[in-house]
């Protein structure tokens, strides 16, 4: 197997031969920082990396992973089956919109939802359907995602996402209209001298209980060595 098609974590491994989007920094940080619970939903699971990270962190949790793309499901299914967390993860091959309709009928609610959402609102469509679904909000608009997650979460439940700075304002607005308040905002820089590269956001359903906790971190130091914060944050996952 080619090296790029396989990624080894400490407690599980990720096959990624078929999925359009491979394991990356966004998912690593989101999985390590997200708030959890007993019932966790991973929207657009892709290779399944976020579902596996949440299953590792929250040992009593049941994780439901939803994915629409046929190729990504091939990888996620294998990754779940080969992990020691297999009994606690359920893979659903479906669109989020259809999954929402079914679960609302059943009355199922979750304590935590995690999603590395499509966000390239203003960019050109990717040449393959898989990458378009994974990268563009045309396949899952922010408004549909935020409103749907709000309906699936119990009161006080958390919605955890990774968002680039250029769509932060739009995404915030949709979440606020859907009944969330922003509990935590991790501003992540690649290096100290550059601007924020990504935001790890934790929204909570319900009325705001406190001001948003804003934190700024760098993945690398000024001399380009890996920061202690980054190593500490991912020490339970990366080799």
Image (cartoon, rainbow, N blue to C red):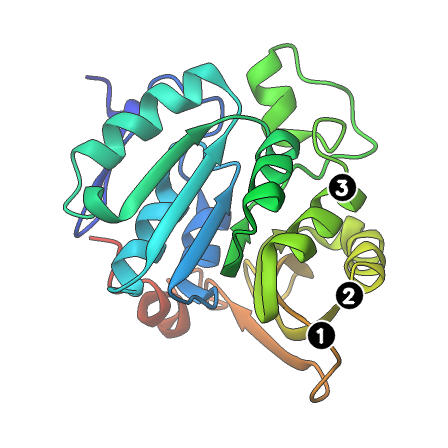
Mark 2 and 1 residues: CB-CB less than 8 Å, in contact?
yes
The residue that label 2 is drawn on is 179
Q: From mark 2 to mark 1, how far is it between C-alphas?
A: 6 Å
- Residue 15 appears in the picture as rendered: yes
Say if 236 sits above or below 96 in the image. Answer: below
Q: In this view, does 108 lie to the left or right of 10?
A: right
Q: From mark 3 to mark 1, how far is it between C-alphas?
A: 18 Å
Which of the two discs, 2 and 1, labels the residue nearer the N terminus?
2
Residue at position x 49%, y 22% from top?
A: 20
Q: Which of 120 and 63 is in front in this view?
A: 63
Residue 206's label in the rendered image is 1
- The quarter of the picture where the N terminus appears is top left
Say if 20 sits above or below 237 in the image. Answer: above
Where does the image place residue 189, in percent across and percent down from the top left? 59, 62
Q: Residue furthest front?
A: 106
Q: From mark 2 to mark 3, how far is it between C-alphas?
A: 13 Å
Q: In which quarter of the image is residue 228?
A: bottom left
Where does the image place residue 63, in percent across and percent down from the top left? 37, 50
Q: Residue furthest top?
A: 127
Say if 191 sits above or below 71 in the image. Answer: below
Element type at marker 1?
loop
The residue that label 3 is drawn on is 144
Residue at position x 20%, y 48% from top?
A: 85
Element type at marker 3?
helix
């Amino acid at each position: 197997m080619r090296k790029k098609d396989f990624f080894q974590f400490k407690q599980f491994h990720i096959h990624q031969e078929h999925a359009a989007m491979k394991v990356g920094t966004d998912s690593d940080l989101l999985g390590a920082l997200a708030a959890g619970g007993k019932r966790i939903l991973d929207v657009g699971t892709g290779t399944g990396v976020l579902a596996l990270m949440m299953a590792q962190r929250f040992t009593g949790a049941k994780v439901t992973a939803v994915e629409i793309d046929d190729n990504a499901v091939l990888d996620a299914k294998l990754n779940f089956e080969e992990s020691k967390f297999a009994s606690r993860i359920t893979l659903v091959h479906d669109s989020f919109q259809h999954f929402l309709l079914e679960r609302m009928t059943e009355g199922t609610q979750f304590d935590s939802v995690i999603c590395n959402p499509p966000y390239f609102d203003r960019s050109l469509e990717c040449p393959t359907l898989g990458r378009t679904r994974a990268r563009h909000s045309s396949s899952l608009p922010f408004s549909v995602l935020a409103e749907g997650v709000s309906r699936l979460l119990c009161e006080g439940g958390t919605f955890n996402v990774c968002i680039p700075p250029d769509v932060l304002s739009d995404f915030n607005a949709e979440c606020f209209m859907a009944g969330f308040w922003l509990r935590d905002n991790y501003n992540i820089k690649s290096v100290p001298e550059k601007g924020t590269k990504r935001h790890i956001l934790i929204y909570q359903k319900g009325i705001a209980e406190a001001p948003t906790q804003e934190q700024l971190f760098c993945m690398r130091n000024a001399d380009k060595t890996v920061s202690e914060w980054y190593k500490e944050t991912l020490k339970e996952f990366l080799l």
